[in-house]
Amino acid sequence: MSKNKIILSALIVGLLIPAANRLTGQEAELTVPPELLSQWDSALKGEPLSVVDVDLPAFKETEQGAERFARRFLDFNQAKKSVLEKGQTELFQLNENANRALFLSGQQGRALASKEKIQYLFRRGQNRYSFTKFLVGPGCSLLPEARAVAAARDFLRRERLLPIGTETDLEKTETGSSYILSQEGKKRIVGQTVRFRRTLGGKRVFNSSIFVHFYPENLELLSLRLNRWGRVKGQAVNQARARKLASAQEYLRLLRRRLALIKRKGQGKFKLASVELGYRMHENQLVPGFECSVELRKQVKGRETVDGLVFFLALNGEDLTAGEEGEATQPKAAAGRKEPPERTGAGLKHLRKPG
C-alpha cells in the first residue's frame, strides 16, 4: 500500500466553520478504545508541564545554517523564486545539468548519473527549511539501521546544521525508505531516510524534527529538512495553555466537535488510534498538550480505505492545529497499478520504531 499526504487546511478548520456547529456544539461519532481512555486519564494525573519560550536567536542560527548549506547547490540569484503560504514561505528552484553531489561520509564518492536535468529546490519559512535534489538512482539495498543513523548524525554535526545545545536531541530516531513500485507490485529501493525527533524533558515535540534522505549505496544526500529545531529559553510568563481540563472525556468532547467540522455525508467512521502527551511549537513557544491520531475508515469503490488524521489539543483544550498544517496518511491498494517514479526525498515511508 502507498501513503499519500493529506493537508487539513485552515479554511476547513477556521474560516468555513458552519455557524450551526459553533452554536450547537455538534459532535461527530468517535470510537474510543477503553485502553486509550485509561491512558489519557493517567497522563492527566502525571507531573504538570509548562509552556516554554523558545530561544529565537537559536532559530536564527538554524536559518543561517540552512541557507549557507543550500547555497552550495543553488545560486539564489539564478533560481526561480516563488512565494507561498500567504507570503510566509519562499521556494527557490533551479534546474542544472550537473549533479552537485554531497556525501554523508564527508568524502568524495561516485555520484549518481542522470540523463536529464536535475532539479534543486530550497524552501524556507515559518522555522522550516528543506533542500531537495530530485534524482532517482538504480535499485539498491538499505544500510543497517545503526550505520544509517550514525552517518546522518555525523553529517549534521560536521555541516554545523544544529545550534549549540540541541545535539542531544538526536538520540530519538526512526528510519525508513523510499521506493518505486512496479506494475507487478515489486518495490525498488531508491533512497533511505533517517528522522530525528525533538524531545523536551523526555516528551516529544511533535512538529519538530530533522529528516536526512540519501542514496544508501554511496551515501549521496538527496534531501534535508529542518523543522522548527532550536534551543528553548525558559518557562513562559503566560501559562494559560498549560491548565489541564478535568478529564479525558472533556478533551474527547472537544475532539468530537472538531471532527464534526470535517464530517461529510457518507464519509465513514472515526476511531481514536493513539493519544500522546507532549509539546507542539506554536507562536514561538512549546505548548504542552495531547497529539491525537484518528482513523477515518470509509468504503471507496467497494474497498475500505483508512485516512489518518492528526490533531493537537493544548492542555487547556485549545486546538493548535487549527489554521496550521496538519497531516495524515492514506494507505490504499496498489497491486496491479504502476506508480510513476517517486521524487526522492518527497516523503518518509515505512518508519521503524524509534531507536
Image (spheres, rainbow, N blue to C red):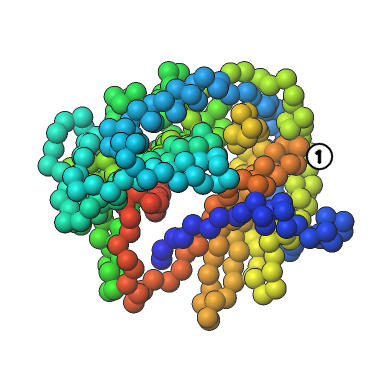
Disc 1 target residue: 246
**Which residue is most to the right?**
23
Task: Residue 85 in the image: state x and y as whole percent.
Answer: 55, 46
SS at mark 1?
loop
Residue at image point 65% right, 67% down: 269
Q: Can residue 195 be seen in this view?
A: no
Instruction: Look at the picture and state if 149 lies above or below 68.
Output: below
Residue at image point 54% right, 52% down: 327
Task: Residue 156 in the image: state x and y as whole percent.
Answer: 33, 29
Q: In which quarter of the image is the C terminus?
A: top left
Instruction: Look at the picture and state if 122 lies above or below 12.
Output: above
Residue at image point 65% right, 47% down: 323
**Which residue is most to the left?**
110
Q: Is residue 68 visible?
A: yes
8 and 273: which is toward the camera: 8
Q: In which quarter of the image is the N terminus?
A: bottom left
Residue 267: quadrant of the picture: bottom right
Q: Which amino acid does label 1 sit on?
A: Ala
Task: Residue 39 in the image: state x and y as whole percent.
Answer: 66, 44
189 and 126: which is toward the camera: 126
Task: Residue 230 in the image: state x and y as whole percent.
Answer: 49, 26
Instruction: Look at the picture and state if 74 lies above or below 189.
Output: above
Q: In this view, does 334 lie to the left or right of 159?
A: right
Q: Is residue 166 left or right of residue 250?
A: left
Residue 298: quadrant of the picture: bottom right
Q: In this view, does 141 lie to the left or right of 121?
A: left
